[in-house]
Amino acid sequence: MNLLQKIRSRIDEVARFVRGRRVIEDSVRLDFVGNRDQNLFHGVHDSFEAAQAESYGVAGYDNEASANLYLDHVRVDGSDILFASGSLQYLPQRLAHYLGEWSKLPRRIVINITPIHSVQSYFTVNGIGTAFCAYRVQTHADLVRGLSPFGYRMRDHWLNRGKHLTLPLNPALSLDHYSGCCFDLPP
């Protein structure tokens, strides 16, 4: 086989690989968009806005069908404790941004069921069956760094092993557990 034939052969191999990859990507996207009863994820983005811009259909929890999913779980706390369980990842800004707007800080912050990646912060899109939501994944260091300027110190942290995030085509960014932690302001 001469050099030209070898080059053509390699080009054909690459083309078959690229076509195969597109078929797999299309299949994953169709499964994601067609989902109505699972908690799925798709794509990796650099910002909340980029993830939110993905056009798969109804976006976010700001619609009746999505809001009704958790209607039985909402309670108004009314004390000096902020309890955020499975919610921070849906906010356009980090928790520190919102704390900066409050006139009185909670004495204790309990964060549970939050996607924490060991190395990289990123955004993805979460298909919840009724809508598609921009979804933040942050590092533990980013979370601590955001709360430290307010005086918060970590009291405890834990793993939520029953919760995971699978990112097809991006296994290094998938999570085999979520995390929780407790922060206190010094007395």
Image: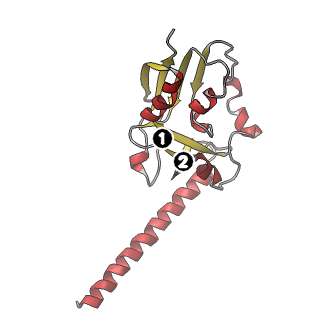
Q: At x 75% / y 40%, what residue is drawn?
A: 63
Instruction: Tell which residue pokes out farthest to the left in this image.
Output: 1
Q: Is residue 50 left or right of residue 25?
A: right
Disc 2: CA contacts within 10 A as few (<14), some (14-19) or many (>=20):
many
Q: Quadrant of residue 84?
A: top right
In the rendered image, which residue does mark 2 sit on?
124
Q: Amino acid at mark 1?
A: Leu
Secondary structure of the residue carrying tag 1 is loop
In this rendering, the answer to whether 158 lies above or below 13 is above
Q: Position of residue 187 (x, y in %)?
A: 51, 8
> Of all residues shown, which one is farthest toward the front?
149
Is 110 above or below relative to 135? above
Q: Secondary structure at mark 2?
A: strand
Q: Assess whether mark 1 and mark 2 are in contact (beta carbons under 8 angstroms).
A: yes
Q: Is residue 135 above or below residue 13?
A: above
The x, y position of residue 119, in whole percent, is: 39, 41
